[in-house]
Amino acid sequence: MNTTTALFYVFSAILLFAALRVITARSTVHAVLFLVLAFFSASSVWMLLRAEFLAIVLVLVYVGAVMVLFLFVVMMLDVRSDTLRAGFWKSLPLAGVVGAVIALEMALVLMRGFQLHAPTPSARALEIGNTRLLGIEIFTQYLYPLQLAAVLLLVAIVAAIVLTLPSRKAARHLPPGEQVRARKADRLRIVKMAAVLERPATTPPEGQP
């Protein structure tokens, strides 16, 4: 066993332990911190697989932005884990069976790609770099799946914003259909009125009542 294989097993063990603690930790803040540890361990595994770009993106995006945001939200909302964990042990057997089925399906699909050692990069990857090769593959061969994923994420963002908007009773709401069917005659009425001229008030000279 060489150094790369030993490090792979060490980081994989840390990753599995952190993932288990994410769902078993009593404190929500501790669960978020264990998730950060899981992301760091997964990033280390990707570094061993010579996927440097994915490792850096995982650390910068998820650990540096998303998980910090999660941590601040959890600390500000003061989420009570006792209420969220109600019925956890009752649903644990079913969740374990579902997790085992998912792991078995992934193993059957990825069985041919399981290797203990990192694969040797191709000559093209060594020539132009791993990051550039990944960009070429994404924006040429996988462009349509990338656009589809972007549309789905946009729809999810809009739905999350709509669901979290507070409902204010004092706000006036008008259906969009009525706004489109509105006409100028319904909103504006021109009335013709005769001009009325008023005589200016005259001020009496000084000394007279």
Image (cartoon, rainbow, N blue to C red):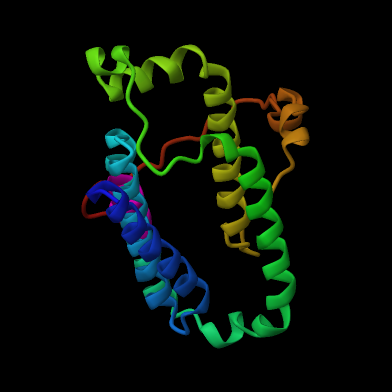
Residue 8 covered by magenta stretch: no
193 relative position to 208: left or right: right
Q: Residue at x 57, y 18 (%)?
A: 144
> How far from the left and from the top, in percent, is residue 16?
45, 64
> How far from the left and from the top, in percent, is residue 22?
46, 71
85 relative position to 22: left or right: right
Farthest-out residue, front: 1
- Residue 69 appears in the picture as rendered: no
Q: Which residue is at the front of the view, 27 or 9?
A: 9
Q: Which residue is at the front of the view, 134 or 144?
A: 134
Total marks placed = 0
> How far from the left and from the top, in percent, is residue 100?
67, 61
Where on the picture, by quarter, is residue 135? Answer: top left
Q: Residue at x 67, y 52 (%)?
A: 104
Residue 201's place in the image compared with 6, above or below, is: above
188 relative position to 3: left or right: right
Q: Residue at x 32, y 23 (%)?
A: 121
Q: What residue span does the magenta drawing correspond to?
A: 59-67
116 relative position to 23: left or right: left
The secondary structure making up most of the magenta span is helix
Q: Which residue is at the front of the view, 204 or 96?
A: 96
Residue 35's place in the image compared with 49, above or below, is: below
Quarter in which the C terminus is drawn: bottom left
> How far from the left and from the top, in percent, is residue 185?
75, 25
- Residue 128 appears in the picture as rendered: yes
Where on the picture, by quarter, is residue 169? Answer: bottom right
